[in-house]
Amino acid sequence: MVNIKRWFRHALMPPWRWRVSFPKVVLAEIERAVQQSELQHRGELRFAVENTLALARVWRGISARQRAIEVFSNLRVWDTEENSGVLIYLLLADREVHIIADRGIAKCVAQAEWDETAEAMQKEFKQGDFLHGSIRGIERITLLLAAHFPPGTSNPNELANKPVIVK
């Protein structure tokens, strides 16, 4: 069944809305936080923000989680030596955060732990604090990854640290 309220949220979201929540200074801080995080473990983080989905996709009922999995694939987060990629995905129109972990990490960290982090980020985002919500989420993910994937002697940066605005 089509969720008309959701469809209108996507239809009426201005295409520039992401710039209000994630101006250049916030994106730069997120990039720095990802870079610092990856020094503490062997995981690879990607941070992606999407303003809205195409209206036809909303009409068909594509969920934010389904879209997060697509973005995980499109950004090749799965393409790391130890299958240690993690995607933080935010769909602004739905006000949802999803954290998708590759299979190497999913064996060690339960989805419930990722979901708790995503919920904490959503709470901060609902209050309009996108910078601190993002940084605190990255910090929580860092603790999980450091516990299960501590840095080794070789810790290459396999994925870009710069946040992605999905268009």
Image (cartoon, helix red, strand yellow):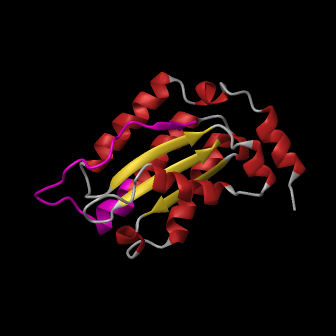
Q: How many marks?
A: 0
Asked which quadrant contains residue 31, the reply is top left
Q: Quadrant of the C terminus?
A: top right
Task: Name the residue nearer the viewer: 167 or 37.
Answer: 167
Question: Is 128 on the left-hand or right-hand side of 107?
Answer: right
Q: Main secondary structure of the magenta part?
A: loop
Q: Position of residue 110 (x, y in %)?
A: 48, 73
Write the residue at 55% across / 70% down.
Answer: 112
Give above or below for 136 relative to 117. Answer: above
Task: Find the magenta span and give its range.
Answer: 142-167
Write the residue at 52% across / 70% down.
Answer: 111
Q: Quadrant of the N terminus?
A: bottom right
Give above or below for 21 relative to 77. Answer: above
Question: Is 60 on the left-hand or right-hand side of 83?
Answer: right
Task: Name the residue nearer the viewer: 143 or 8.
Answer: 8
The question of residue 35 being in magenta is answered with: no
Q: Position of residue 66 (x, y in %)?
A: 62, 60
Question: Is 54 on the left-hand or right-hand side of 87?
Answer: right
Please, which residue is most extreme toward the left here?
153
Q: Position of residue 136 (x, y in %)?
A: 47, 46
Write the residue at 68% across / 28% down.
Answer: 15
The question of residue 148 being in magenta is answered with: yes
Write the residue at 38% across / 60% down.
Answer: 78
Please, which residue is most extreme toward the bottom here?
107
Q: Position of residue 51 (x, y in %)?
A: 65, 37
Question: Is 132 on the left-hand or right-hand side of 46?
Answer: right
